[in-house]
Image: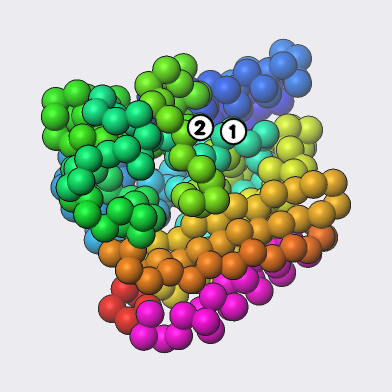
Amino acid sequence: MTDKTIRIGTRGSQLALVQAEYMKSLLQATHAGLEVDIEVISTAGDRSQKSNIALSEIGGKGLFTMEIEEKLSNGEIDMAVHSAKDMPTALPEDLALVCFPPRENVADAFISHKAATFDQLEQGAIMGSASLRRRALMWRKRPDLEMVMYRGNVGTRLQKLKDGVADATLLACAGLNRLGMSDEITSELPIEDFPPAPGQGAITIEAHRGNSRMLELLQPLNHRDTHIALTCERAFLEELDGSCRTPIGAHAVVDGEKLSLHGIILKPDGTEDHEARMDGTVTDARQLGLEMGKRLKLEAGEPFFEGWS
């Protein structure tokens, strides 16, 4: 990296590119004269998008980050732009999540040409989703629903809906908003009933711990409340990582110096769930997440997780 040029690494999906361009614009608006290049990096997760197998069955979140992190560790790129919900809790020792710009809407969007709301879906309607969390939350409320595997980028999933593969689907409001596709949202699901994935709606920047120049450039772009909320949610997820195939939802809210966390774990079929709400302060963000994770693991008991780790 020269004094004026940095290299951003990103996946090649439309949403990933929009997020990379967003970070490029923030950097250049904050640091006059800075030159920024964007490098598209193919990941195993992208290459497996056509598969009808759930992500949890073929390697989990790391499928979308491994190749990018290799280039970051090798110095081939200077920073990586990720969707925070795609990030594993365990990172390479030389890398860190160093910047969280302001978070978008955390809610899930209900999208259908056959019903105005999730509750109005006909009995036995077909839902398209590959998300363990979304499937479990939907079955918790509507065990009558039929689920079909539904992977691919946003455009692919919306096209499948138009083609009649499913009656409805759920997508993140944040992604649709960033893509300028908010008009595709039929209705927004209530966060209390459909807690988001940890990190949903947030972008995070990964960089090499030893790259002091990059850390200095990113520091002004970090959004305090988003960083605190994500620290809490990711700690909750970290405590539960021994059961990484468990559907997990988490939403932390910062109000001044106060912090609240809503967390949930479910069986994949939605027949059992354990949910908690805890309050604390922003200085205890990580501890609050860890404590809730421990509480729900204890409440659920070991049999709850058997066969999913």
Judge by depth and name the residue closer to the eye, 37 or 142.
Answer: 142
Mark 1: give few (<14), some (14-19) or many (20+) Cα within 10 Å.
Answer: some
Left or right for 284, reference 25: right
Residue at 68% x, 18% y is 28
Which stretch did the figure color magenta? 284-304
Residue at 42% x, 35% y is 109
Indicate the amino acid at tag 2. Ala
The residue identified by callout 1 is 104
Q: Does residue 51 show up?
A: yes
Indicate the amino acid at tag 1. Glu
Please provide percent x and percent y for residue 113. 26, 25
Looking at the image, the residue that sits furthest to the top is 33
- Vertical position of residue 103 compared to residue 36: above or below: below
Left or right for 22, reference 108: right
Please provide percent x and percent y for residue 53. 19, 53
Judge by depth and name the residue closer to the eye, 297 or 11.
Answer: 297
Please say if the residues under marks 1 and 2 sit with CB atoms less than 8 Å apart: yes
